[in-house]
Amino acid sequence: RAPYVPRCDGSLQSMVNALLELLEIRFEQFDLDGAGTICMNELLHGLKLSPLQFDVHEVISKFRAVDEDRSGDLDFAEFFAFIYLTIKSRPGYISFFFSVPENQELVRKGSVALSNVMSKYDTDKSGRLSRDELEGMFSSEFPTYVQNGMFAPVVDFLLRERGGDLALRWLLMLFYAVFSKSPGTRLKG
């Protein structure tokens, strides 16, 4: 059976959706016990399945850096942050997570698109998006989600939980929560 490669028409929405699909699939594959989080042992096990060698100390260091709540486990947003930091510092390491070249390219492009859209709307250059910045981004880039009412309740919840603004990993969670509620999506949410 051929490996899954999400459809992507090159639009921002399509790239972000493809990125989310691939991250969701990999997260489920690494989450061996189905707990909805990935512990260090699960992460190391998943990485050992790759034919490439990785630096265990670097993995542990990045794991600790992105484990925001210090739970010892990575949730979906932290897993994305782990992958993002890893491939940003070592682009070749993308093959630890995605073996299919088309998926590697989709993850690269989707990550860059996500980072670029965040930079575009981060008017105060804080590295975080406020409610006004998020509303501007969604109104311009993803108006359907604002018009159909999917955006407001999700952003309200995340902003309450995250203290009033969102960093990149939580922007991804916002997209994930909103996109997974869309009709016809492959995302489980």
Image (cartoon, rainbow, N blue to C red):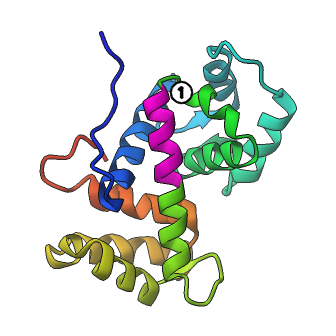
Q: How many marks?
A: 1
**Amino acid bearing label 1:** Phe
Quadrant in the picture for the N terminus: top left
Identity of the residue drawn at 66% across and 23% down: 47
**Whether residue 41 can be seen here:** yes
Q: Which residue is mark 1?
A: 30
Q: Nearer the viewer, residue 16 or 80?
A: 16
| x then y, percent, for residue 3 | 36, 19
Relative horizontal placement of residue 102, taking residue 189 as reference (left or right): right
Q: Nearer the viewer, residue 3 or 129?
A: 3
| x then y, percent, for residue 33 | 50, 24
Identity of the residue drawn at 63% across and 41% down: 73
Q: Nearer the viewer, residue 131 or 42?
A: 131
Residue 83, quarter of picture: top right
- Alpha-carbon neighbours of circle 1 within 10 Å: few (<14), some, or many (≥20)? many
Q: Residue pushed farthest front?
A: 10
Q: Which residues are magenta?
A: 101-111
SS under mark 1: helix
| x then y, percent, for residue 129 | 52, 79
Relative horizontal placement of residue 121, taking residue 177 as reference (left or right): right
**Whether residue 35 can be seen here:** no
Query: Residue 131 colored magenta?
Result: no
| x then y, percent, for residue 167 | 58, 69
Identity of the residue drawn at 44% across and 42% down: 106
Residue 94, quarter of picture: top right
